[in-house]
Amino acid sequence: MLQVYNTLTRNKEPFKPLKAGEVSIYACGPTVYNFPHIGNYRTFLMTDNLVRTLEYLGYKVTLVMNITDIDDKTIRDSEKAGMSLKVFTEKYTKEFFKGLDMLNIRRASVYPKATENVGGMVNLTQKLMEKGLAYEKGGSVYYRISGFPEYGKLSKIDFENIKIGASVDVDEYDKDNPRDFALLKASTPEEIERGICYESPWGKIRPGWHIECSVMAMKTFGPTLDIHTGGVDLIFPHHENEIAQSEGATGNPFVRYWVHGEHLIVEGEKMSKSKGNVFTLPEIVEIYGGEVVRFMFLSVHYRKKLDYSEAFAENAKNNYMKLKETLDNLEFVLGSADDREYPGDEETLKVLPELEIQFKEALEDDINTPKAITAFRDLSRTANRYLEAGKNRQVLEKIHTLYRQFSDVLGLFAGKEEVPEEVMKLVEEREAARQKKDWSTSDSIRDQIKDLGYIVQDTKEGPNVKKAEGELTA
RNA sequence: GUCAGAAUGGCAGAGUGGCUAUGCAUCCGGCUGCAGACCGGAAGAUGUGAGUUCGAUUCUCACUUCUGACUCCA
């Protein structure tokens, strides 16, 4: 049984979906105003792991991830770039998807856009207005926090003892209470001129930030959904506000399990532009490759800070290569498997199911990917040990199936590259030279192959050629 | 200032009231024409100080350090 840490209760809880066998998840997606950085992707990857784990456990999962394509930053930066809001956000939406592919993050079921759901936001605001939970001032509509006694239940913030942030909203004086937040913002003359505005009963407006998630989540799932994910920084105020909006309007619990991913920091410090330590995904994927980056993220539990550094990435790369190497070797030997019996057969067949349980239990324990990787390593060692002496087809296939299963759940080792003919030819030539014990020719051919980006490993079963990845460290 | 979460070997990281896993890196050995991969082995850690206990890395308290939220933020 899957255990999930629920921010609402600050405890690991057994996971039971609302509908047996089906899980509804809403994930806070990107604001498309720039290239997302690696920290953003860590959070998206966490959601991907959650989905993959749930499916591995037999659930049918529907994932909704929003795209915020209208807010202060998109409006500001599209103006700066001299582009229309639409063209500008479409550009970065594309970049966002490219990043998902680099990390082998699977697509959500739907990616609703804020701009396509403004009608729903106006309706929800209307409903809150009718319940006395919202009020209009100066053409903007605000949520009245004093009308929702449970406000603060997610973040556990005691609003009596907290100081109001130093930088106060420009329109602060409009609000009844400084903590009240905007549901809909009155359009400015510049926005109207650029056509970034919508009609509403309160005049021309554009959406505030928090309301889109309430609307888009409930649009697909109804008033209550199973899981809502996001980064820890969203707990307050974003998710707190989502709860206030949704539950205020419907009277039903909004989210049953709140799952939040910890931040990624860089060499012990928060990523920030002023420190110049912000990394975009393509920057590090170029150095290490997407799968290594994925593995790196998997090797740290999602509720722990990940301290990114070059040394850490190198370490992850070595660890990753080790697992990949085993898979390559396994598949290579599979090509010459036979039906004879080998001494390791029985022992190996006995441990495989145990490893599967170990792996599954690790993921069931709040998606403990580092623990799952340990099980994976055990499998790798088991495979390598068996490979020392045995190559019974049935046994190899069983190992291979389990290896693939682990890989798929973790989203690793997806691509399979064919070795070009040119390289294969050289390998054959080298073999011929080796037969004649012509080591100097054989070694020089090996260098040629290496220059083409491939590595030959001599084994009992003949030469094994593989792509030399990870050698291109910049 | 208020609140929250951390602290395990060079790096990453589990688990546990009574031998601290595992992997990478390091060293030694085996295998190999060499290399690689692999196998075997070695060394190496629980932030500081108290307390509870027969015994704590694990429980409690304090301290220190770090990170975050309170303001846009994954």
Image (tube, coloured by chain):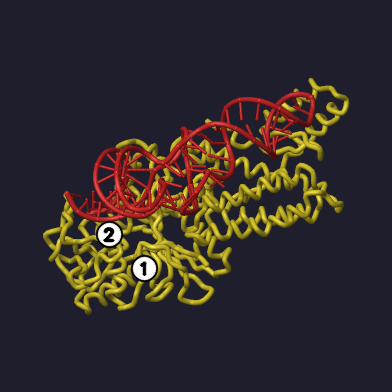
Chain colours: A yellow, B red
**Which residue is identified by label 2?**
A237
Determine whether the residue tagged by mark 1 lies in a helix, strand or loop. helix
Residue A429: x and y in percent read: 82, 30
Q: How many marks?
A: 2
Residue A117: give its label: 1
Determine whether the residue tagged by mark 2 lies in a helix, strand or loop. helix
User: Can residue A31 be seen by looking at this rendering?
Assistant: no
- Name the residue rendered at 56%, 65% in the picture: A55
Three-letter amino acid code of the residue under disc 2: Pro
Q: Nearer the viewer, residue B1 or B22?
A: B22
- Name the residue rendered at 67%, 56% in the picture: A402
Q: Is residue A446 above or below residue A286?
A: above
Q: Which of pointers 2 and 1 lies earlier in the amino acid sequence?
A: 1
Three-letter amino acid code of the residue under disc 1: Asn
Is mark 2 in CB contact (under 8 Å) with mark 1? no
Residue A77: x and y in percent read: 31, 48
Q: Chain of mark 1?
A: A
- Name the residue rendered at 55%, 39% in the picture: A317
Q: Is residue A175 above or below residue A370?
A: below
**Marks 2/1 same chain:** yes
